[in-house]
Image: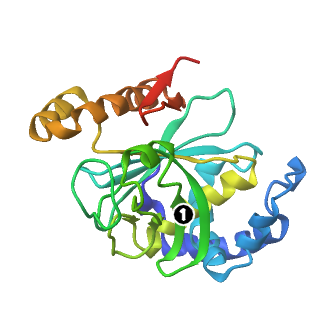
């Protein structure tokens, strides 16, 4: 497990020479990784180059550059205002918590997002669907809200959109991490995509869904209890089995988890 505090100015300086080499060869060339065209585009952008220069060396223990395999998912907890990055370096490994980042700011309350302008951070199962190296908030990773569940359960014409994990410290429903912290998340996601991960899951939970926590939250916010019952087994499998669950969305927008 790596803390963001491990990154230092001296490491960033040392990284410059290393990362310039990486940007040319896309790293691990002996493994014959063929970067997708959008990865090539990404590393040509100044903010992405800066992220590699400042963060790459400190993230090598997570990326493990001696292997061509890297896979990740994100878990966000609204009550704790925390984003976790879970990774593995082999398809036979279990995922492990590699690094976490504190939100810079939050908005809304606990419970899912259901309408444009409600300031809610979503809750549910999503994936990254947009890399923006030219964001108004330095760098940003878009998630596919509204997903299939939201499209059924949210406002029929104004469910909201444009949910991102981004830099800066402003939000009306997104997750801001500061410009410095988004560099690490963005780099890791970019590396996962370069190494072949097509879909990077993002799980938004109201809190760490431990039994005592959820008992209290359901008592305080009973209107969300039924919805949270759907998310709890997803959380438990991610945390205890350290593997991605197989999830489906039913005709009424309900999340269901299936045994592999």
Q: How is the image coloured?
A: rainbow
Q: How many marks?
A: 1
- Seen from the viewer's position, the closer of residues 11 and 168 is 168
Q: Position of residue 216 (x, y in %)?
A: 12, 34
From this viewpoint, which residue is outermost toward the top? 259
Q: Residues within 10 Å of mark 1 (few under 14, many from 20)?
A: many
- Seen from the viewer's position, the closer of residues 253 and 183 is 253
221 on left or right of 39: left
Res 236 quadrant in image: top left
- Seen from the viewer's position, the closer of residues 121 and 253 is 253
Q: Residue at x 79, y 59 (%)?
A: 27
Q: Position of residue 116 (x, y in %)?
A: 35, 64
Q: Position of residue 191 (x, y in %)?
A: 68, 56
Relative to residue 24, is residue 208 depicted above or below? above
Q: Residue at x 66, y 82 (%)?
A: 46
Relative to residue 118, is residue 230 depicted above or below? above
- Seen from the viewer's position, the closer of residues 232 and 112 is 112
Q: Quadrant of the C terminus?
A: top right
From this viewpoint, which residue is outermost toward the left? 220
Label 1, secondary structure: give it.
strand
34 on left or right of 71: right
Relative to residue 221, is residue 211 depicted above or below? above
Q: Residue at x 57, y 66 (%)?
A: 55
244 on left or right of 179: right
Q: Residue at x 80, y 63 (%)?
A: 26
Q: Position of residue 87 (x, y in %)?
A: 57, 42
Residue on which the image places disc 1: 141
Res 130 quadrant in image: bottom right
């Amino acid at each position: 497990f790596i803390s963001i505090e491990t990154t230092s100015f001296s490491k960033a300086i040392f990284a410059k020479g290393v990362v310039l080499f990486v940007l040319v060869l896309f790293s691990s060339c002996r493994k014959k990784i063929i970067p997708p065209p959008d990865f090539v585009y990404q590393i040509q952008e100044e903010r992405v180059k800066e992220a590699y220069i400042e963060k790459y060396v400190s993230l090598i223990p997570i990326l493990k550059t001696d292997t061509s395999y890297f896979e990740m998912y994100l878990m966000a907890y609204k009550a704790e205002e925390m984003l976790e990055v879970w990774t593995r370096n082999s398809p036979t490994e279990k995922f492990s918590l590699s690094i976490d980042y504190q939100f810079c700011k939050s908005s809304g309350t606990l419970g899912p997002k259901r309408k444009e302008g409600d300031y809610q951070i979503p809750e549910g199962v999503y994936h990254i669907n947009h890399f923006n190296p030219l964001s108004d908030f330095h760098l940003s990773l878009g998630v596919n809200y509204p997903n299939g569940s939201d499209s059924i359960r949210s406002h029929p014409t104004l469910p909201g959109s444009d949910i991102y994990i981004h830099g800066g410290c402003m939000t009306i429903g997104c997750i801001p991490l500061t410009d410095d912290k988004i560099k690490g998340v963005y780099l890791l996601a970019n590396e996962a995509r370069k190494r072949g991960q097509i879909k990077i899951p993002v799980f938004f939970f109201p809190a760490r869904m431990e039994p005592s926590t959820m008992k209290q939250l359901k008592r305080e916010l009973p209107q969300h209890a039924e919805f949270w019952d759907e998310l709890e087994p997803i959380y438990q499998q991610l945390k205890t089995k350290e593997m991605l669950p197989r999830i489906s969305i039913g005709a009424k927008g309900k999340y269901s988890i299936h045994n592999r």
